[in-house]
Image (cartoon, rainbow, N blue to C red):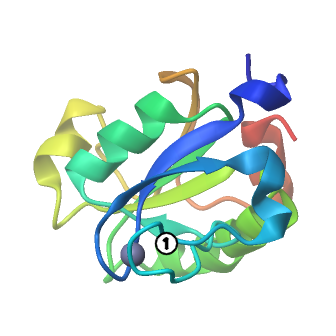
């Protein structure tokens, strides 16, 4: 149902206050705001997530979700980072980009069979549909995301 505008919603946490917000991605251009603190919910950039946020965002997303398992000390991860930012900007409202710090969330990383970083997973309707291990170009990310 990813192509159905009525289903293009996602639950994300507010970066400022932590409140869960249900965002209509079809109206992302209107600038969604947190229902509690009123701060903007910015989906045009990669979102750093905890294991719990990862699960609720992937499960609730009405659009494909591109997830980057990375670590701060990883050189190839730094190479991919600007391409992920570009993906989030370019496909805002049609794709979500999440970042999982594999050092902070080792259990989640293991659960997804991630053995090397960066590993990029594409989820659609809550299920992994594709993955890419190692550094990737923007063109490779576009193919991975099916854009
Ligand atoms: Zn808030």
Q: Is residue 105 above or below residue 78?
A: above
Quarter of the figure that contains the N terminus: top right
The x, y position of residue 25, in whole percent, is 72, 48
The x, y position of residue 80, in whole percent, is 62, 70
- Mark 1 sits near ligand 1, with its Cβ under 8 Å away: no
Q: Say left or right for 52 vs 21.
A: left
List the residue tagged with mark 1. Answer: 77
- Residue pictured at 55% horizontal, 42% vertical: 10
Kindly give the residue lying farthest to the left in the view shown: 107
Q: Say left or right for 103 vs 81.
A: left
State which image quarter holds ligand 1.
Answer: bottom left
Q: Is residue 98 above or below residue 58?
A: below
Q: Residues within 10 Å of mark 1 (few under 14, many from 20)?
A: many
The residue lying toward the viewer, choosing from 117 and 94, is: 94
The x, y position of residue 133, in whole percent, is 51, 46
**For the residue labelled by badge 1, is the local secondary structure a helix, a strand or a loop?**
helix
Q: Say left or right for 122 vs 106.
A: right
Q: Say left or right for 36 vs 8.
A: left
The x, y position of residue 92, in whole percent, is 78, 59
Kindly give the residue lying farthest to the top in the view shown: 1
Residue 120, visible in the rendered structure? no
- Residue pictured at 34% horizontal, 51% vertical: 116
- Quarter of image, res 20: bottom left
Residue 29, visible in the rendered structure? yes
Q: Is residue 107 above or below residue 6?
A: below
- Residue pictured at 35% horizontal, 39% vertical: 56
């Amino acid at each position: 149902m990813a192509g159905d505008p009525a289903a293009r919603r996602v639950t994300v946490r507010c970066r400022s206050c932590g409140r869960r917000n249900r965002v209509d991605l079809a109206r992302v251009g209107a600038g969604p705001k947190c229902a509690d603190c009123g701060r903007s919910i910015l989906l045009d950039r990669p979102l750093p997530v905890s294991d719990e946020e990862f699960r609720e965002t992937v499960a609730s997303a009405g659009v494909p979700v591109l997830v980057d398992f990375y670590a701060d000390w990883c050189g190839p991860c730094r190479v991919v980072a600007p391409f992920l930012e570009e993906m989030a900007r370019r496909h805002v409202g049609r794709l979500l980009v999440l970042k999982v710090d594999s050092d902070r969330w080792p259990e989640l990383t293991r659960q997804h069979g991630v053995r090397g970083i960066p590993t990029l997973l594409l989820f659609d309707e809550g299920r992994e549909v594709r993955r890419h291990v190692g550094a990737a170009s923007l063109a490779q990310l576009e193919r991975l995301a099916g854009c």
